[in-house]
Image (tube, rainbow, N blue to C red):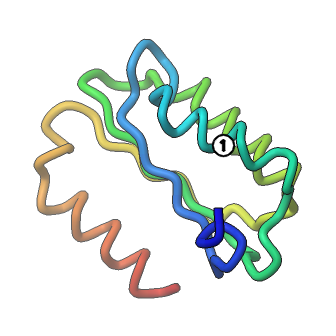
Amino acid sequence: MPVYLESDMLVFASPIYYFGMTAQITAAIQRVYCIGKPAKATKAALLLSSASPNPYEGAIATYKSLCAYTGLEDMGVFTAAGDENKSEAKLKEICEFAAKL
């Protein structure tokens, strides 16, 4: 919790199982609802991985709702499905995004 409160940006990352984020990241998100926005953070991003294409709708909706609730600016949603999970091009895309922050 101290790291959450002191963060400049939140980056959520999760594999997708049955069209949603893992129980562990969902629990972490639910535990911060009572706190709301971290004092210093202004931005957020989401990284999702799956074995099949397009199972992301539920996870993205959760993330967008969290951004709206906390007032964090959505900096982007990045997904990787199947072979993209091991793709140098996908890794480069995410690294370039991170470098711009």
Residue bearing mark 1 = 29
Query: In this image, 83 relative to 22: left or right?
Result: left
Q: What element carries label 1?
A: helix
Q: State whether residue 90 is above or below residue 82.
A: below
Q: Given the current orientation, which residue lies at the most extreme bottom position?
A: 100
Looking at numbered disc 1 in the image, what kind of residue is underneath it? Ile
At horizontal 42% and vertical 78% (from top left) the residue drawn is 98
Q: State whether residue 41 is above or below residue 66.
A: below
Foreground residue among 22 and 68: 22
Provide residue 12's location: percent of width, then percent of height: 52, 53
Query: In this image, 89 relative to 48: left or right?
Result: left
At horizontal 75% and vertical 49% (from top left) the residue drawn is 32
At horizontal 39% and vertical 86% (from top left) the residue drawn is 99
Provide residue 27's location: percent of width, then percent of height: 60, 34
Number of other residues with Cα within 10 Å of mark 1, as a class: few under 14, some 14 to 19, many 20 or more: some
Q: Given the current orientation, which residue lies at the most extreme top position?
A: 18
Quarter where residue 89 is shown: bottom left
Quarter where residue 96 is shown: bottom left
Provide residue 42's location: percent of width, then percent of height: 76, 76
